[in-house]
Amino acid sequence: MRTINKIILHCSATRVDQNYSFQQCRADHRSKGWSDIGYHYYITRDGLQHIGRPLWQSGAHCRGHNRDSIGICYEGGLDEHGRAADTRTEPQRDTLHRLLAALHMRFPQAVLLGHRDLSPDLDGDGRITPAEWAKQCPCFDVRTEYADLEPF
Ligand SMILES: [Zn+2]
């Protein structure tokens, strides 16, 4: 098994009223020439948890951080106008929390982050502020929401 230092959350950056299935995401990633979907888990709007890459394998979801991380993506992240928004449904929230709690037990040293929290620190002050976000993904504040899952 790899060493897991980070668990990184993503959104699929698709509209809340748009269907973007696990199969479609996998097909899109494979069409880029990747061996498989880039994420380890994909959670559709109905709350179903789909298994992507096996955990022992590096993902392809966050440049520079794939080797020691687990990548999780939820379907959505844009409102009906295409603007970044926390579109998680109740079933998605429930499934995400259950999955993260389980991963936290298995990888207690891993820190939980949103994709945007790993944007370059442009002004070098040691904090990634909203002005520095390379993208909005996953469109909610992961560290606030899952403060109870801090590394042991
Ligand atoms: Zn992302």
Image (spheres, rainbow, N blue to C red):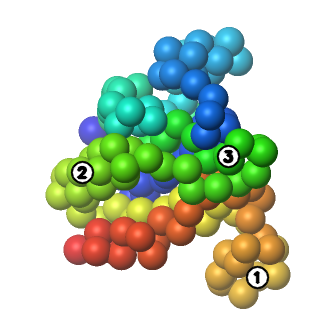
Q: Which residue is mark 2?
A: 98
> Could you tell which of marks 2 and 3 lies nearer the N-terminus?
3
**From the Cβ of disc 2, is ligand 1 less than 8 Å away?**
no
User: In what element is the residue under mark 3?
Assistant: strand
Q: Residue at x 43, y 57 (%)?
A: 6
Look at label 1 and name its amino acid.
Answer: Gly
Mark closest to the chain's N terminus, 1 or 2: 2
Residue 124, labelled with which disc?
A: 1
Viewer-nearest of labels 2 and 3? Answer: 3
Which residue is more in the foreground, 126 or 135?
135
The label shown at residue 78 is 3
Q: Position of residue 136 (x, y in %)?
A: 70, 57
Tell me which residue sits at (77%, 58%) in the image.
134
Q: Is residue 53 above or below residue 78?
A: above
Tell me whether circle 1 and circle 3 mark residues in contact (CB < 8 Å): no
Q: Nearer the viewer, residue 92 or 61?
A: 92
* Amino acid type at image mark 2: Arg
At horizontal 68% and vertical 12% (from top left) the residue drawn is 31
**For the point 78% across and 45% down, which residue is it?**
81
Disc count in the image?
3
